[in-house]
Image (spheres, rainbow, N blue to C red):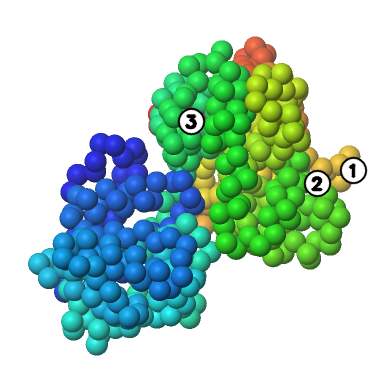
Amino acid sequence: MQKPSEIFDRDAEWDELVRFAGIQRGGATLGVVSGRRRQGKTFLLDALVRAAGGFMFTATEASEADALRQFGDALGSYLQEPTPLRFANWDEAITRTMTLAPAGPLPVVIDEFPFLARVSPALPSIIQRALDPAGQRSNTQVRLLLCGSALSFMGGLLSGTAPLRGRAGLELVVRTLDYRSAARFWDITDPRTALLVNSIVGGTPAYRHEFTQDDTPAGPADFDDWVIRAVLNPARPLFREARYLLAEEPDVRDPALYHSVLAAIADGRTRRGEIATFLGRQPSDLAHPLGVLEDLGLVVREEDAFRSNKGVYRTAEPLLNFYHAVMRPAWGDLERAGRARQVWPRLQRSFLSKVVGPHFESVCRSWTRWEADPDLLGGYPSRVAAGVVNDSAARTQHEVDVAAFGRDEQGREELLAIGEAKWNETVGLSHLQRLTHIQALLRGRDGVAAGRCRLLLFSGKGFSNDLRAEAQTDPDIQLVNLERLYEAG
């Protein structure tokens, strides 16, 4: 089954869906598809169903009786029944659904499954029973796909003692596009413009078509105008999207608290204690909201590269970070139509320091982990993170933007490289000297195999001539500019 031309990228996801939908075996099988909102899950599944002639039902927030009625209407329409189908309960509905594929494998999709399961908690158990040996005797080759955006709920369907544990033949997560794919999706060829746009909208496909109506910056000179007309414009849907992202999540019971947590992270308070101080609360009070934000895929906790018991929280959705760091402090002014052009110049400093800078560091870590040639690093990286190195002699600490670890021939972890990332600075010998000093500290530290550690310097602005000359004579020093970050591997 060929992937439709209107689906961008997603080759691996499409191949897995096609494989699952065409499994040649008797009885029904189960698959679970999840991912954050706006990533194109429904688009993918709808294309699969249309290509295979399958059935798709998209649930809404409704009572159990209303949801059953809607399901019966949709199924009756699909089967071209003269009258709508009516089910007394979900037991009847699922039993009937499992008979839809007598002639061969057929995809059947229930989208927004969490809406149904919340008003009908027994539904996962009913599906489990239908997949049991006794139920399979009357089943046909239905390839049932349950889809949802509530990541914690969808993950819980198949975990622990959940009824559907061990039942799924597919567990597919549709992730955001990476920074390189996002640049191609937005048709942006200039690396600087691509990274600036990515620092605001990330890799969420819907933000290009549905939210900006394909309004893409024409180049570096058009970027500021694009922000004003497409992002900070109260008449455009992207303007309020960050607020709606939390409002759409049923697990978020106190939106004000969650927005305050995100505001603290956007302000650079990335450790739990720092977030608690920002909010005037105890660190223990934040365990639940931070856990919920992690489950929703909106926040990630990253372990310190050099201290396994330490970690920082980062916003996983760039638009949320942009909203809290840039838009929220000026919301009153921005809500007035036509004010963005006057307000944006005074917001740019925060944009560069709190949004673009941290995002650039994240992109550099991603490049090091997934795109860098292993020969450049001296090995294949098994993990890449940021971290803090203590300097007891100077009574200070040094932040390391990129630390790449690999495994030696005996399987022991070793430090392959450390790196410094500067978005809006020309990187020179002083940055190299700082990195060299940190390298020396790590080589003298117990528990860190850093003998072959190389040095990476990333810049969004460029490198000084003396640093370029130094790097030309030392292969252990690598300079990585925007063109290198975005070049095809």
Q: Residues within 10 Å of mark 2 (few under 14, many from 20)?
A: some
Which one is earlier in the sequence, the residue at label 3 or at label 1? 3
Q: Which residue is mark 2?
A: 390
- Residue 224 in sight here: yes
Residue shown at 41%/25% (left/top)?
Answer: 187
Q: Nearer the viewer, mark 3 or mark 1?
A: 3
Q: Which residue is mark 3?
A: 212
Q: Which numbered marker is on residue 395?
A: 1
Question: Is residue 281 or residue 15 the one in the foreground?
Answer: 281
Q: Earlier in the sequence, mark 3 or mark 2?
A: 3
Among numbered discs 2 and 1, the one appearing first in the sequence? 2
Q: x and y percent of residue 212 in the render?
A: 48, 30
Q: Quadrant of residue 17?
A: bottom left
Q: Callout 1, which amino acid? A: Arg
In contact (CB < 8 Å): disc 3 and disc 2: no
Does residue 114 lie above or below 160 as drawn? above
Q: SS for tag 1? A: loop
